[in-house]
Image: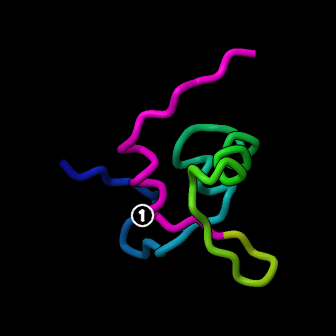
Amino acid sequence: MSIQIASPNAESQSFAVTKREAAQLLGVSLRTIDRLISLKELPVRRLGRRVLVPRTSLQTLLRTDHPTQSA
């Protein structure tokens, strides 16, 4: 089973997205993306000051279960 992440312009799909774009694609907040990155559950690539999320990282994240923590 293959998980496809759709984008508005699928023809020019990039290999990586920004944190904000990743949050929009997953339907979560930017803070959630930051938390997943800090917990090393979402691998990223850094280019200078830019933080990019490879699309393969998003697909891998969606394939695994992530337990929630109660406050």
Colour pattern of the rendering:
rainbow
Q: Where is residue 10 drawn, in percent x and y?
A: 38, 66
Horizontal arrangement in the rendering, residue 1 relative to residue 15 (left or right): left
Q: Where is residue 71 drawn, in percent x and y?
A: 76, 16
In magenta, the rendered stretch is 52-71
Q: Residue at x 41, y 44 (%)?
A: 62
Is 4 covered by the magenta stretch? no
Horizontal arrangement in the rendering, residue 39 relative to residue 12 (left or right): right
Amino acid type assigned to the residue bearing label 1 in the image? Thr
Q: Where is residue 29 drawn, in percent x and y?
A: 69, 39
Residue farthest to the right, as pictured: 49
| Residue closest to the eye, 11 or 1 | 1
Horizontal arrangement in the rendering, residue 40 relative to residue 9 (left or right): right
Q: Quadrant of residue 35 in the image?
A: top right
Residue farthest to the left, as pictured: 1
- Residue 53, placed above or below residue 39: below
- Residue 55, placed above or below residue 5: below
| Residue closest to the eye, 23 or 36 | 36
Q: Quadrant of residue 30 in the image?
A: top right
Q: Residue at x 62, y 73 (%)?
A: 45
Q: Where is residue 51 drawn, in percent x and y?
A: 71, 69
Q: How many marks?
A: 1
Q: Which residue is mark 1?
A: 56
User: Mark 1, residues whose alpha carbon is within 10 Å: few (<14), some, or many (≥20)?
Assistant: some
Is 54 covered by the magenta stretch? yes
